Image: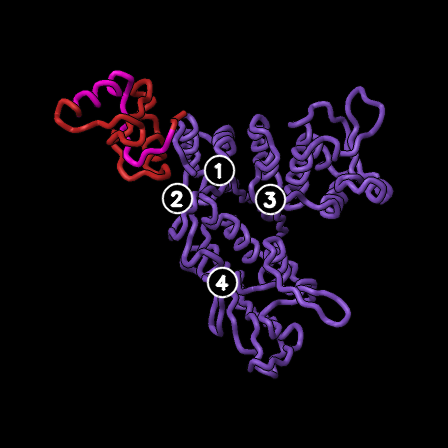
Chain colours: A purple, B red
Amino acid sequence: MIDVINIKGFRGLRDFSMSNLGRINLLVGTNNSGKSSVLEAIELMSSKGSIRPIWSATSRRGELLWFDDDTRRHSEADVSHLFYGHRFNVGSRFEISDSAGSDNNHFSVEVVSIPDDNRDVLVAPQSSEMGDSLGLKFEWTNGLPKQSLLAPLTPQGGLTSRLGRIPIDRNDLPPIQFISTAALLPVEIQSLFDEVVLTPEEELLLEALRTIEPDIERIASIGSDRLRSASGIRQGNIVIKLKNQKDRIPIGSMGDGIWRMLGIALALVNARNGILLVDEIDTGLHYSVLSKMWHLVQSTAERLNVQVFATTHSRDCYESLASISHDDISEGSVVTIQRIEKNAKQAISFTEQEIVAASESGIEVR
Amino acid sequence: MRSKVHPKRLLVEGREEQRVIPELIEKNGIEWGDSNDSWIVKIDEFDGVDKLLKPGVIEAELKSSGLSHLGR
């Protein structure tokens, strides 16, 4: 598990660290303090050189450069926003590591001029009228000798989606699931659901959904595009069976809370021995189900060895975290709250004991 | 539940202290203020010394957001 994370030069985080991390970590802070950036940093570091998370992160934020050519409209990831100050030159870099002062797990990206004969280049650099071609040099370690990869940037300074789709074969990558503030797409839910069907974890999905609707008896995928294409609704291919009701019901009929909870549960079981990242975890969930949600997340994360990082703006969300926190922290805190303050170098870390005290006394931790 | 974050807070055992301390401050010539925003310090009572001294309370208070001064 990650117990410390250090981030330098990434997005709005010039020099930032977060320590005393536990299995469940809730990130709080004002708007634009860097909570989502921390989640992205964890995903990038843990992905070790895969370009896919960079493409995903910039796409989620709409940081794309659009171009029209003769045949079609296409986009590139505008990577300038990944660098502190929203701009880069040769030598600009960001780095992320997960331990204090050692190279235990270290990831960096630096803007470099690409030499013509570099063999590690994923795709041959395009010629640029502006001068030398630029590229991003990825370097990472994981208790192993340093590894590196060079990805060329386009003349506009973007990263093409073609690079994001290149599969990088590294079996040592932990599974990482990232749920953004937007709901998971049907195709994502379907893909995650397929991994769970007829496994012991399927029961967990029902347990999760029953925190919101106790009458749910079964969940299934009808595996057909008919409903999706006919109705146009996003959740058309997942159906549920309610107690005392004869017909199956599209899960979309049950409201956004059910969809959100399904997404969290699916992502959790698909992150076994890895990391779950959830931006604004309480989105769509009524305050009355938050304690149950935390119990479910904690017990599953313990059982499947998943480390969870989530963000929130909600008092209900962090106060309900006290329901899985303990007064006795002699063996360390399994649950933490980390407050991120804009331009601060260190997150303020709350132990379980302090989370309980804050909840009982109405102390403002955000 | 506390109504509003005040940067200067004083934690006291009970309602008696919460009521008396502003009186003492004013008797000593210091203007107390007439609203939550203008009070020179916000006094939070803990309904007993046990709750005030409970492990984790002072640590969490010291880390609370927007705090500049804390007394107990």
Name the amino acid, label 3. Answer: Thr
- Alpha carbon separation for disc pair 3 and 4: 22 Å
Mark 4 or 1, nearer chain start: 4
Query: Which residue is labeled 3 in the image?
Result: A181
Which chain is mark 3 on? A
Q: Nearer the viewer, mark 4 or mark 1?
A: 4
Quadrant of the rendered image containing residue A58: bottom right
| Left or right position of A116 against B39 | right
Up-down: is A275 above or below B35? below
Could you tell me if the residues under marks 1 and 2 are in contact, i.e. CB atoms within 8 Å? no
Which residue occupies 26% across, 20% down?
A: B18
Name the amino acid, label 2. Answer: Ile
Within 10 angstroms of label 4, few (less than 14), some, or many (20 or more) residues?
few
Name the amino acid, label 4. Answer: His
Query: Which residue is labeled 1 in the image?
Result: A335
Are labels 3 and 2 assigned to the same chain? yes
The answer to whether residue A89 is magenta is no
Q: Nearer the viewer, mark 3 or mark 4?
A: 4
Which residue occupies 62% across, 61% down?
A: A64
Mark 2 or 4, nearer chain start: 4
| Percent position of residue A113, x then y | 54, 78
- Alpha carbon separation for disc pair 4 and 1: 33 Å
Identify the magenta region.
B4-25
Query: Which residue is labeled 2 in the image?
Result: A348
Q: In the current view of this chain or complex, which residue is farthest to the top?
A: B16
Q: Which mark is residue A86?
A: 4
| Percent position of residue A219, x then y | 77, 33
A311 or A107: nearer the eye? A311
Mark 3 or 2, nearer chain start: 3
| Left or right position of A236 against A263 | right
- Alpha carbon separation for disc pair 3 and 2: 23 Å
